[in-house]
Amino acid sequence: MDLIPLRIKSGTVLGYEGCILNEVLLILRGCVGRESSIETKMGLPPQYLIEGTIFGEKEVMFNLELQATYTALCDCYILSITKENFNSLLQTSDHFKQQVIKVVRDRDQIRHNEIMRKKNGEPIEEPLMTQ
């Protein structure tokens, strides 16, 4: 499995909301913005993904469309793991699979809690940084 870091220019869209992603992306350096049209309509702020954050894993694991648009907010270095290689890692390492599932659950729970706070009129911290 060859993993080569990609240099991404600021402003580059890494994935559009509603599209199918065929890779999992890991931010090695830089910052990526995550913006969902549904969450924006609800008044939730965008999220900022920082170095060390992986994204697209849930969509690849469960064959889902992206739930948000991801844009490089500065020049970034991204590691791209193809869907095939990612699924191979999941199949060969139960520990890796459990850790990825935990990240997905934790991230979804945090966003769910933010949505509930917003619905209840509670303040939401800005900017939202995810790792």
Image (cartoon, rainbow, N blue to C red):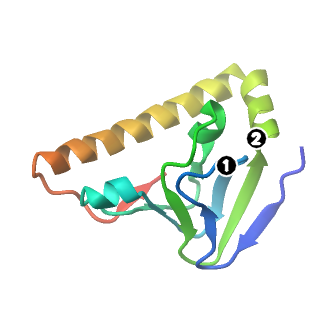
Q: Secondary structure at mark 2?
A: helix
User: Looking at numbered disc 1 in the image, what kind of residue is underneath it?
Assistant: Leu
Which mark sits nearer the N-terminus, 2 or 1? Answer: 1
Instruction: Say which of marks 2 and 1 sits in front.
Output: 1
Label pair 2/1, CB-CB below 8 angstroms: yes
Q: Position of residue 103 (x, y in %)?
A: 51, 36
State whether residue 120 is above or below residue 96: below
| Residue drawn at x 28%, y 64% as measured from the top left | 126
Question: Seen from this angle, which residue lies furthest top?
Answer: 94
Q: Secondary structure at mark 1?
A: loop
Q: Position of residue 49 (x, y in %)?
A: 49, 60
Q: Nearer the viewer, residue 117 or 97?
A: 117
User: In the rendering, which numbered label is found on residue 32?
Assistant: none
Question: Seen from this angle, which residue lies furthest front?
Answer: 18
| Residue drawn at x 60%, y 47% as measured from the top left | 56
| Residue drawn at x 75%, y 32% as measured from the top left | 87
State the separation of the CA atoms marked 2 and 1: 8 Å
Density class for disc 1 (Cα within 10 Å; few <14, some 14-19, many ≥20) is many
User: Looking at numbered disc 2 in the image, what kind of residue is underneath it?
Assistant: Lys
| Residue drawn at x 65%, y 54% as measured from the top left | 26
Q: Nearer the viewer, residue 56 or 75?
A: 56
Specify the quadrant that holds the N terminus: top right
- Residue placed under numbered mark 2 in the picture: 83
- Residue placed under numbered mark 1 in the picture: 21
Q: Nearer the viewer, residue 29 or 108?
A: 108
